[in-house]
Image: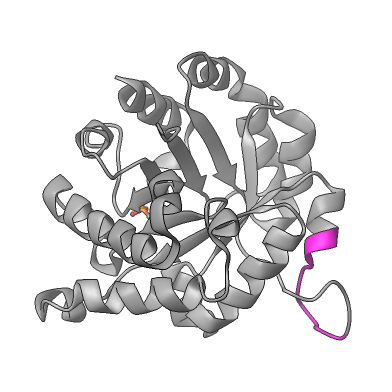
Amino acid sequence: MARKKLLLGNWKMNKTPSEAKEFALGCGDMIRFAVDNGIDVGVAPTFVCLQTVVENAPKDLIIAAQNCNEHDHGAYTGEISIPMLKEIGINWVILGHSERRTYNGETSVACNAKIKALLAASMTPVYCCGETLETFEAGETKSFVKKQIEEGFAGLTAEEAKKVVVAYEPIWAIGTGKNATKEIAEDTIASIRSVLKALFGEAAEEIRILYGGSVKPNNIAEYMSEKDIDGALVGGASLALDSYRGLIENLVK
Ligand code: 13P
């Protein structure tokens, strides 16, 4: 089964609501171009910008939050729940980004609870994994990422697993300009798919796996030529309209 290509922009802690609104109002043509070319495209603004992007962007733009809490409500100061996101029209959430793992103590086990809560709410989790430079240089990438995948997907059925998007982002490639070669990205992503195959059988062929880490308009096409890479999770290059358009145009080539 052909997996639909996906481009997701992770805005991280960038853009005020008025800046996010400007992007939302300006992205109409490129979103139409993406849809016409059969690809899914989205952005992940900060919580305070979600509503303005929902209200001002074309309906085909996927809008993702950058985190959520697994509880519906309660005494969790500073947290945002899934029903809150749903009510403002958000159906996708990024989980386990390496920055949240590093700065906020997010673990794969914690992500597993969030993945289950999102699936129960018919929402789409984008589960991030990836190794440090030290792990990469020690040649331990595959075993490290395998553990992240097994813990994140624990207890899911094959039907549920199909609905999760995975993003492989080597930490050494994030924001450094040192993107992984397409061969390295494909090698790890193929190994992730084989871990998913061991867990879920043929359903693994339907799970979309993205590469992330210094993806730019001038290198995105390389990744798309690899058989297991289904798109990209992009930070810096997703912020400006021109650059986002460049990503879409080169992704569909
Ligand atoms: P950059 O594209 O800025 O390297 O960021 C990648 C990333 O972390 C996306 O989630």
- Residue 145 location (% of width, % of height): 31, 72
Q: Nearer the viewer, residue 60 or 46?
A: 60
Residue at figure coordinates x 45%, y 16% from the top left: 37
Residue 78 on the magenta span: yes
Q: Is residue 71 magenta?
A: no
Q: Position of residue 105 (x, y in %)?
A: 52, 85
Q: Nearer the viewer, residue 245 or 136?
A: 136
Q: Nearer the viewer, residue 20 or 45?
A: 45
- Give left or right: position of 126 versus 85: left
Residue 59 is situated, as x and y percent measured from the top left of the image, at 71, 27
Name of the residue lying farthest toward the front = 201
The residue at the point 73 percent across, 52 percent down is 122
Q: In this view of the protein, which residue sits in the foreground, 47 or 143?
A: 143
Q: Residue at x 43, y 25 (%)?
A: 245
- Of the 4 image quadrants, the one containing the C terminus is top left
Judged left or right of residue 75, residue 212 is left
Residue 178 visible? The answer is no
Residue 60 visible in image: yes
The chief SS type of the magenta part is: loop
Q: Quadrant of ligand 1?
A: bottom left
| Residue 229 shown left or right of residue 40 in the figure | left
Which span of residues is magenta-colored? Answer: 75-83
> Is residue 36 shown above or below 91?
above
Q: How many marks?
A: 0
Residue at coordinates 41% horizontally, 26% vertically from top-left? 248
Residue 126 sits above or below residue 88 on the image? below
Assign the N terminus to one quadrant of the image.
top left
